Image: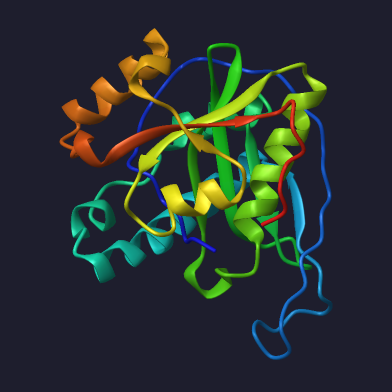
Amino acid sequence: MPGHSEPRKRSGRRSHDKRWVTLRVSKKQGDVPTRDDEITIRLGRTSDLQACRLIENDAAGIFEAINMSEIDDDSPSDIATLDEASRDGRLWLACDDDDVPVGFAYTHTVDDCPHIQELAVLRAWQRRGIGARLIEAIARAARQAGAEAVTLTTFGDVPWNGPYYARLGFRTLAEDEFSAALREILAEEKALGLDVTRRIAMRLDLRAPTPKG
């Protein structure tokens, strides 16, 4: 389970699906003290925005272990971007039983489908399936809205990026499958200084069942 934190890409495209989803994830005895064994996945609120930034900063620290400190040093998503995602129903929170956020994800719309802009989980809460449940919530809402897929760009060779998403049912797109919008996103990443030879675009086809992570 990743403490996934993507480089901070920006987009103003909007989606307006505001459905709530509640899911549960079991915790091992003694892992994190809470009143019960429940994680709730819900839509984000404006009061959650600073917590998202703190989560993103914490999760990015995992990149130090593979000598990618430039990701750890990057700035978290800005408040304006998170606020827009929250107001549009594109920000999802994973919260403990006290409603304290421990993970989040947000999307924007690319090719009429949700595109995961950021997904991050506190390192203390990683490897419990929380990232998978955030993706499941995004995919469920997207299906209900009639979208055909969920897409993202990520590092193909980082274990908690490309290989992780592949286990959740995403497939790597060949270059000739890139839409103009995906090419634009990858060009923006190159402009940010990312090694685009390591970046891939992935797609989760929503016409097939979502694998459990």
Give the quadrant of residue 176: top left
Please name the residue shown 36% across and 58% down the image: 60
Measured as percent of width and height from the top left, residue 130 is found at 65, 59
Residue 169 % position (x, y): 61, 43
Q: Which quadrant would the C terminus be assigned to in this image?
A: bottom right
Residue sitting at the far bottom:
30
In which image quadrant can residue 137 be found? Answer: top right
Identify which residue is drawn at 40% across, 40% down: 77
Query: How many numbered discs, if any?
Result: 0
- Quarter that holds the N terminus: bottom right
Residue at the image point whose x is 69% and y is 91% from the top? 30
Q: Position of residue 56 (x, y in %)?
A: 43, 54
In this rendering, position of residue 26 left or right of residue 120: right
Query: In the depicted view, which residue is nearer to us: 21 or 111?
Result: 111
x, y percentage for residue 36?
A: 84, 77
Q: Residue furthest top?
A: 180
Please tell me whether residue 91 is drawn above or below residue 142 in the rendered image.
Answer: below
Please say which color scheme the image uses: rainbow
The reply, left or right, for residue 163 in relation to residue 90 is left
In the depicted structure, whether residue 172 falls above or below residue 49: above
Question: Of residues 59 and 161, which is closer to you in this image?
Answer: 161
124 horizontally vs 174: left or right? right
